[in-house]
Image: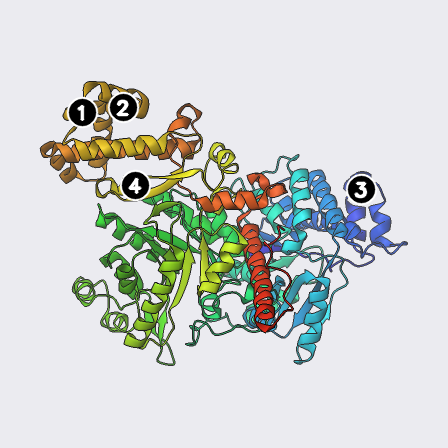
Amino acid sequence: MKAVVFPGQGAQRRGMGRELFDAYPELADEASEILGYSLRTLCLDDPHRQLGRTEYTQPALFVVGALAHRQWRESTGEEPAFLAGHSLGEYCALHGAGAFDFATGLRLVQRRGALMAQARGGGMAAVVGVEAAPLRELLDEGGFCDLTVANDNAPRQQVVSGDTATVDALVAYLDARDVRCVRLNVSGAFHSPLMRQAQQDFARFAAGFALGDPATPVVANATARPYLPGRTARTLVDQIVQPVRWTESVHHLLDRGVTEFVELGGRVLGRLIDQIRSAPRPAARPAAPAASPDTPAAPPGTPAAALGSAVFRRRMGVRHAYAVGGMYRGIASAEMVVRLGRNRMLGFLGTGGLPLPEIEQRVKEVRHGLADGQPYGVNVLADHDDPAAERALVDLLMRHRVPVIEASAFLQMTPALVLYRARGLRRGADGRTVCDHRIVAKVSRPEVAEQFMAPAPGRVLDRLRRENALTDEQVQLARTVPMSHDITVEADSGGHTDGGVATVLLPAMLGLRQQAQDRHGYDEPLCMGLAGGLGTPAAVAAAFMLGADYVLTGSVNQCTVESGMSTEVKDMLQDIGIADTAYAPAGDMFEFGAKVQVLRKGVFFPARANRLFSLYSHYDGLDEIPEKTRSLLERTYFGKSFEEVWDEVRGYLRSQGRDADIDRADADAKHKMALVFRWYFFHTTRLAMNGDGSGKVNYQVQTGPALGAFNQWVDGTELASWRHRHVDRIGLMLLDGAAEHIATACRHWRDTLGGPRATDAPPQSRRT
């Protein structure tokens, strides 16, 4: 099986394309006309020494690659099984696969080259003799967290990108450690987040072209997997800021059965492919050694990288002690999780309220969008009504090898949760327990936190062993590790909330953590994070100063480009203040009086939901509700009669195999009333998610005052509009601002305690 591959920048040489221009003079002339200069003269003579300049190199390489592919196909009559290209070469591959014609490809490449050539303030360096994983460790240890491994060219050949000063510092740092690192003669930090402006400009340009799907699979640099249908333009736009995952791309082609690689348009990739084929595949990384949660990290690249626990960062494979929670019904979308993961930040896919097939599709999207080792997780919401559904979700996540779950709303350790944790346990070569399944537990009650910080209940383990769901070794190991090494303490927040106060909850939970660590003597330390109310740098700084090992944000991410919430709701959320939320009954725990925090401004939902709970508390059935009240509810709340609502609810329950609930409702009028009222909560969520303007006053939008605080912080900047808000940028802004706030506060108090030198109180963190 053959794959045709095309090199990128660096393959250019004077004299290239001579035979091709003679063989295809009309295409050569067309290229010159599009470019506005003689391509033949540039490639063959290069009289003005322009061939090495990005804006000239990229169009020249595209034309040579495209013509070389045409000649190869005409001379051999063959069609490859796959195509791929290194950086710029990917355009040749897509053209060869029929995604766009010659002229379109050349115009795209010309614009791409011009934008990349305009990039300033960044640089690149080649690191030779070090594999990707050890290089990332070197970067972290040396405090170069802002640098990106931009090209993974071969097992021992990497290229890093970043700002010029940091790249220069890296060259000196590695040289002192006898690691070969060579500064490249480029004007920008290609394939890194510093190319964001070029990416945005290119996206606007590319929007003017109709790009099709490749007829032959093309392996993308950004994902190391074939292009997905309908994603050609998006993937090319992403490529500008994403690393070139060439080693992984070649591994994928080999795994798909490719035995022969044909390089067209240069003689660069053949050597890299030979190195990749001959080198052993990297083994899975061992678990991090035990350490204290507050072990300081190596000198950080930025102050934000020093915040929180180094153990948490290593355990989760992230750059910062920061995570984004799994907001329900896909508000924490696959796009959100992928964007975070690509920037080495942890995000949890929101699955609450979604059917299992849709969850599976979204998990696949996340896995496809991320490279091996890039962090991600999936939220698992406790299902108190249907434990079988909870078990089915966990089975799905194990089948797809999801490495981390966020456990929310659990009151006890369920069999599904224990199964996930124990199934991921094994004994390493050094005899230590390796945890391949991590649980980040989201708790607001001490008694629940204690359960997560203890080993799995013996009775549940014994039951799972009797079912042959676990091996003897897994049961044995599960008795020696906590259910969760990472506990997120949730203070008052958007959505489900117990209204806890962070300054009360976190110190108390930290005391419980110490007791659990002392009682069980775990090899690996417990980490404790904080969530709820984190919408400004000052709030994040306060969390870390209280002792949090990491922070987890929620509401502020709901109003971003990547959020799965409707644009209509985002338009509403970007304007709210800290007083524009209210508490309402939780639809999934309606009968128990559980609360959610929701949007109040511009909607009637909180008042109407509380009215329903009041009626539920006062009456024993729908028939007892006065006719006038009933008519009002049916007309303004439900938009249909109680009987019609019940018919819909009954049909849903029957489709889920929950006939027992139907029988109970037929026998218990109070239970039937609860099920009918619950429908309103589902309906109002659906209205908001769909952006149904006809039902705007009934929108249920779970959010907290942290978003109002964030809106106030960014007022007057471009981030006042959610269309400029991206989850990774928000996280970095909060962390950078928190680090600045802490540093300023420490200086202030040091000066205050040291004498009369103090003159200024710590300022509010500035916006960036």
Q: Residues within 10 Å of mark 1 (few under 14, many from 20)?
A: some
- Of circles 1 and 3, which is in front? 1
**Residue positioned most to the right:** 47
From the top left corner, tell me how far across and down residue 106 is, in percent. Answer: 72, 43
- In the displayed structure image, the side of residue 720 where residue 123 appears, left or right: right
Residue sitting at 42 percent across and 72 percent down? 287
First in sequence: mark 4 vs mark 1: 4
- Identify residue for label 2: 633
Is disc 4 placed on a helix, strand or loop?
Answer: loop
Q: Which mark is residue 711?
A: none
- Identify residue for label 4: 586
Quarter holding residue 126: bottom right
- In the displayed structure image, the side of residue 101 where residue 593 appears, left or right: left
The kind of residue on which mark 2 rests is Leu
First in sequence: mark 2 vs mark 4: 4
Q: CA distance from mark 2 to mark 4?
A: 18 Å
First in sequence: mark 1 vs mark 3: 3
- 2 and 1 marks in contact (CB < 8 Å): yes
From the top left corner, tell me how far across and down residue 667 is, in percent. Answer: 9, 34
The kind of residue on which mark 3 rests is Leu
- Of circles 4 and 1, which is in front? 1
**Residue positioned most to the left:** 667
Is disc 3 placed on a helix, strand or loop?
Answer: helix
Residue sitting at 23 percent across and 22 percent down? 629
Quarter holding residue 358: top left
Q: Residues within 10 Å of mark 2 (few under 14, many from 20)?
A: some
Q: CA distance from mark 2 to mark 1?
A: 10 Å
- Identify residue for label 3: 35
From the top left corner, tell me how far across and down residue 751 is, in percent. Answer: 61, 69
